[in-house]
Amino acid sequence: QVQLVESGGGLVQAGGSLRLSCAASERTYSSSAMGWFRQAPGKEREFVATINWNSRTTYYADSVKGRFTISRDNAKDTAYLQMNSLKPEDTARYYCAARVGGLPSILEAQYDYWGQGTQVTVSS
C-alpha cells in the first residue's frame, strides 16, 4: 500500500509563495499519476493539479493556472506543488493523491491513495 505524506504548508501573506511536497513510501509511485487537491472550510474538495508518471503531461485548475506548478522527482519518490502569487482564496487543506498505473485525472474518485493533507493559510 502506498503511503503519502505531505509537507510544506504554513501561513503566508498574499502574494507570497510556498512549495508543498508529497513523499511516497512505495516504488509503485514512479508509475503513478499524481494529483493535488484542496479543501477549504465548508467547501467540497476540489482539483488543483495533476501530472503523469514521466512529467510530460500536466493539467491545472483554471483558478491556479499560471501561478502553481506541479512537478515530480521519481528518484526521490516525491511530488511537488510550487505555489506562487498566493491569494487568500487559496487557503485550504492541500492533499496529494496517487493513481497507480493510471493517467492523470481531475477526478478524485479515480485516485487510489491519499495523504493526510497539509494546511495552507494565506493572509490578506
Image: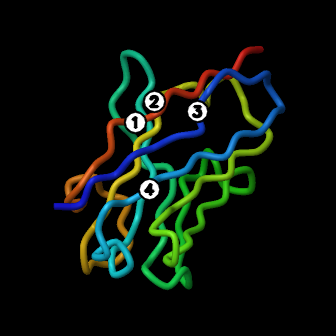
Of labels 4 and 2, earlier in sequence is 4
Occupied quadrant, residue 2: bottom left
Residue holding disc 2: 93
**Disc 1 residue type (three-letter):** Gly
The dot on residue 117 is 1
Q: Position of residue 117 (x, y in %)?
A: 40, 36
> Which quadrant, please, contains the N terminus?
bottom left
- Give the residue drawn at x 54%, y 50%: 21
Residues at marks 2 and 3, CA–CA distance in whole angstroms: 9 Å
Query: Depth check: 6 or 96 in front?
Result: 6
Residues at marks 4 and 3, CA–CA distance in whole angstroms: 14 Å
Q: Position of residue 51 (x, y in %)?
A: 48, 70
The dot on residue 9 is 3
Q: Is residue 107 left or right of residue 13?
A: left
Residues at marks 1 and 2, CA–CA distance in whole angstroms: 6 Å
Of labels 2 and 3, earlier in sequence is 3
For residue 36, above or below residue 116: below
Mark 2 residue element: strand
**Disc 4 residue type (three-letter):** Ala
Whether label 2 touches label 3, CB < 8 Å: yes
Of labels 1 and 2, earlier in sequence is 2
Whether label 1 touches label 2, CB < 8 Å: yes
**Disc 3 residue type (three-letter):** Gly
**Disc 2 residue type (three-letter):** Arg
Residues at marks 1 and 4, CA–CA distance in whole angstroms: 12 Å
Q: Residues within 10 Å of mark 3 (few under 14, many from 20)?
A: some
